[in-house]
Image (cartoon, rainbow, N blue to C red):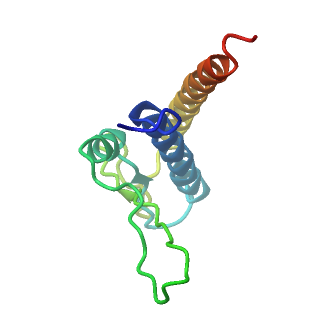
């Protein structure tokens, strides 16, 4: 039986927040390279990442330990892949970053992050309410 505090829903919400943060980093890198010759924008595929997590694949595989006394480490498994966007063709310098497209992705990602944060905060508030027996 899963722990009440670390159940599947909480873990999924936490993973979603991790994804949103990493995706913001990828989008910001794309925006920073808008004038870099030959740059191809990167993207994280949310559905693919979520499906891997829901299929039970370990989202943060443990690192090997060289000594028994060492604490196990974790590696984030989010991967950015080249994005081949049919709507943004490379310019003369070979750069295919579309500023408008990246800004829309950034705004959408920020909205998703806020929604996930609200859902996670509500979940924690319900747990706090249950722990304090309804505020008694």
- Which residue of the protein is positioned furthest toward the right in this rendering? 136
* Residue 28 located left or right of residue 90: right
- Which residue of the protein is positioned furthest toward the left in this rendering? 55
How many numbered marks have been drawn onto this rendered protein structure?
A: 0
Q: Is residue 26 above or below residue 104?
A: below
Q: Residue at x 43, y 55 (%)?
A: 41
Location of residue 40 in the rendering, given as x and y in whole percent from the top left corner: 40, 60
Location of residue 100 in the rendering, given as x and y in whole percent from the top left corner: 52, 36
Q: Quadrant of the N terminus?
A: top left
* Residue 116 located left or right of residue 92: right
Q: Who is closer to the viewer here, 2 or 77? A: 2
Q: Is residue 44 above or below residue 79?
A: above
Q: Residue at x 32, y 46 (%)?
A: 53
Q: Quadrant of the C terminus?
A: top right
Q: Residue at x 59, y 51 (%)?
A: 28
Q: Who is closer to the viewer here, 7 or 56? A: 7
Q: Is residue 65 above or below residue 103?
A: below
Locate residue 79: give its quadrant. bottom left
Location of residue 15 in the rendering, given as x and y in whole percent from the top left corner: 46, 43
């Amino acid at each position: 039986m899963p722990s009440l505090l670390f159940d599947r829903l909480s873990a999924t919400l936490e993973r979603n927040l991790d994804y949103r943060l990493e995706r913001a980093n990828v989008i910001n890198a794309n925006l920073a390279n808008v004038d870099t010759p030959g740059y191809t924008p990167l993207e994280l595929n949310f559905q693919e990442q979520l499906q891997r997590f829901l299929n039970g694949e370990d989202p943060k595989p443990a690192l090997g330990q060289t000594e028994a006394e060492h604490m196990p480490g974790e590696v984030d498994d989010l991967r950015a892949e080249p994005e081949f966007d049919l709507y943004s063709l490379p310019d003369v310098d070979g750069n295919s970053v579309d500023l408008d497209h990246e800004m829309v992705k950034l705004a959408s990602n920020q909205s998703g992050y806020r929604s996930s944060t609200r859902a996670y905060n509500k979940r924690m508030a319900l747990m706090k309410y249950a722990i304090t027996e309804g505020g008694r």
